């Protein structure tokens, strides 16, 4: 069984990015610059944004964090996005989700200039990805694609089952695995909350990508011997033996599934770190005008 090490792979990618940043800085004096907009004081959102800012420092990017109060109006937030759209020094813009209920996520997403949409959430980038054009691909699916590539997982002609159809993980993942390219060329089944016979469908998967958001949902009896299993889920569970008082688990029951899988991502240290590396990579691509030209 191969443990697909997202921590090590993401570090490799960050080293490659840092190397490239030093090159373009020396040649053109340009430093890639990511801006993040954070609304409100949600603890998890703060943690995610801080991790992104820290990762920018690690690779030598500039970063700007725009903090807005939870009661900011939709109009004010749209104006903040517009200002970043128009700031020629900024290459990438992310708005940390979730947003307060009085703000339309769709309106805010649609306000982001596609050329700076390094989260790959705008209709323009989703459309470009679907057409197999150069695009900013959402960071989590992009991170998974990179793991499959770097671990040389064969995907052509394989049956890939994706659990979950969210716009940020399951849905783009299914499109990427079915596209004509590598990784891709798989026969894809996208499953969701209305799917019947899910365990049976999972047992026919050569590659199983799990983004259901339910702790340890996928058990050993749902996995074909030799399958490749990618666990996207992240959940905190209380654990008195840990200094922090909690530990992280995924959507997959790791021990029993690892016994059957040919390769598997752990939680933590699997897909999670790859998501940030993919966001940095998208920002570098933007600074180098590689996607939209
Ligand atoms: P989501 O809640 O938006 O989507 C869950 C999906 O699961 C839905 O599409 C739903 O139809 C499907 N589903 C629910 N019950 C089902 C059932 N019984 N059978 C089949 N499908 C069912 O979740 P999400 O945003 O895609 O995230 C999924 C998990 O991944 C969460 O644990 C989240 O925290 C984690 N996540 C991790 C990263 C990372 O960087 N590692 C990034 C994003 C999300």
Image (tube, grey):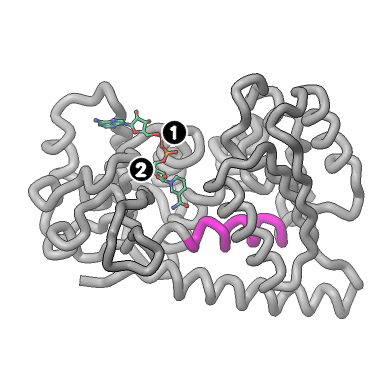
- In percent of the image, x 60 and y 72: which residue is there? 14
Picture coordinates of residue 262 (x, y %)? 20, 65
Q: Is mark 1 within 8 Å of ligand 1?
A: yes
Q: Which mark is residue 166?
A: 1
Q: Secondary structure at mark 1?
A: loop
Picture coordinates of residue 212 (x, y %)? 32, 38
**Magenta-highlighted stretch: main secondary structure?**
helix
**Front-most of residues 85 and 292:** 85
Instruction: Report whether 231 appears left or right of 16.
Output: left
Q: Is mark 2 within 8 Å of ligand 1?
A: yes
Classify the position of ligand 1 by quadrant: top left, top right, bottom left or bottom right.
top left
- In percent of the image, x 70 and y 23: which residue is there? 107
Q: Is residue 194 in view from this perspective?
A: yes
Q: Residue 177, relative to residue 194: is it above or below?
A: below
Q: Quadrant of residue 127?
A: top right
Q: Residues within 10 Å of mark 2 (few under 14, many from 20)?
A: many
Picture coordinates of residue 229 (x, y %)? 26, 55
* Span colored in magenta: 273-284
- Dot 1 and dot 2 residues touching (CB under 8 Å): yes
């Amino acid at each position: 069984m191969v443990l697909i090490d997202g921590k090590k792979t993401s570090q490799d990618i960050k080293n490659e990015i840092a190397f490239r940043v030093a090159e373009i800085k020396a040649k053109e004096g340009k430093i890639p610059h990511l801006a993040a907009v954070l609304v409100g004081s949600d603890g998890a959102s703060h943690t995610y944004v801080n991790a992104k800012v820290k990762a920018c420092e690690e690779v030598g990017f500039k970063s700007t964090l725009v903090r807005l109060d939870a009661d900011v109006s939709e109009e004010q937030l749209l104006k903040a996005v517009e200002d970043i759209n128009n700031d020629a020094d900024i290459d990438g813009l992310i708005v940390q989700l979730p947003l307060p209920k009085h703000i339309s996520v769709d309106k805010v997403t649609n306000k982001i200039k596609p050329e700076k949409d390094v989260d790959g959430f705008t209709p323009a980038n989703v459309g470009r990805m679907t057409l197999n054009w150069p695009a900013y691909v959402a960071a989590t699916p992009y991170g998974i694609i990179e793991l499959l590539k770097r671990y040389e997982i064969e995907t052509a002609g394989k049956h890939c089952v994706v659990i979950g159809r969210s716009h940020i993980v399951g849905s783009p993942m299914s499109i990427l695995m079915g596209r004509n390219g590598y990784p891709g060329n798989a026969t894809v089944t996208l499953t969701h909350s209305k799917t019947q016979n899910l365990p049976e469908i999972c047992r026919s998967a050569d590659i199983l990508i799990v983004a259901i958001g339910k702790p340890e949902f996928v058990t050993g009896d749902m996995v074909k011997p030799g399958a490749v299993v990618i666990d996207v889920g992240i959940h905190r569970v209380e654990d008195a033996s840990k200094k922090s008082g909690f530990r992280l688990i995924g959507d997959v029951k790791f021990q029993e599934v690892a016994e059957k899988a040919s390769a598997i991502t752990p939680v933590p240290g699997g897909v999670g770190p790859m998501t940030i590396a993919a966001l940095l990579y998208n920002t570098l691509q933007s600074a180098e005008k590689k996607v939209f030209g």
